[in-house]
Image: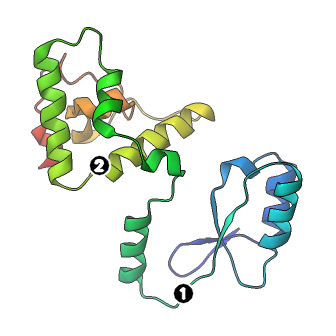
Amino acid sequence: MKTDSLGIPRFTNKDLIDMIYTGHSDKVHVVLCDANDDVDKFNEAMEEQGLSKLKKYIPLDVDEKTFDGVCQSEWFMPDEYKEINVYEYVLSKAEKPCPQHIQDRIWEELDAFKERDMHNLLRYMIYLVDFMRENNIVWGVGRGSSVASYVLYLIGVHKVDSIQFDLDWREFLR
C-alpha cells in the first residue's frame, strides 16, 4: 500500500489479493484505488466467497481543504453505525438502575455534543471501539481532557470514570 499527496492509502492489486489470502477482506469497507487497479476482480472473488464487496472510489482532482471537508462529512464506517441513536446507546451502557444525577450528567454531555454537531463523531467512536475490541487491539487508559467525559467513558474510549473522580466534563468540550 502506498499513500498519495493527501495521505490517502492507495491499494495495489497485490494488496487486494493479500487481503483475500490473509483473511482480512472483511475488515475493509472502502478502498481508494487508481482507475487501472482490479477492484472489480477483487469484488468478484468476494462475491464467490459470500463476502461484502468494496466500494470503489476513484480519486478526484481536489485540494486538501476540499478533501478534508468531504472526509469529515462522509465518516467511513459501516452503515449500521451511521444510524445509531447515540442517546439510547450511551444510556444503555450506564449502570442499572441509573441514579438521577448520572442520567442528568449523560443528558447534559450528549446535548453539548449535539449542539456542536458531534453525534457523528460519537458514532464513529462507537465503531472504532467495537473494531478495536473485535480485533484485540489495545488502546490506552485515557489521555488529556477526554477523560473528563463520562459519555466517552461509557462508549469505551477511555477507562477513567469521571463521575467517580468528580471531573468537570466541560474541560473536554471547551
Residue 152's label in the rendered image is none
At 29% from the left edge and 25% from the top edge, which residue is drawn?
91
Question: Where 140 falls versus 49 (above or below)?
Answer: above
Mark before the other along the chain sequence, 1 or 2 = 1
Residue 60's label in the rendered image is 1
Q: Quadrant of residue 66?
A: bottom left
At 48% from the left edge and 35% from the top edge, which residue is drawn?
139
Badge 2 density bin: few <14, some 14–19, many ≥20, Cα 10 Å? many
Q: Nearer the viewer, residue 44 or 127?
A: 44
Q: Nearer the viewer, residue 91 or 70?
A: 91
Residue 22 location in percent, x, y? 83, 47
Residue 119's label in the rendered image is 2
Inspect the image, locate mark 1, and give the three-letter code of the amino acid beneath it. Leu
Inspect the image, locate mark 2, and give the three-letter code of the amino acid beneath it. His
Q: Secondary structure at mark 2?
A: helix
Q: Is residue 119 left or right of residue 139?
A: left
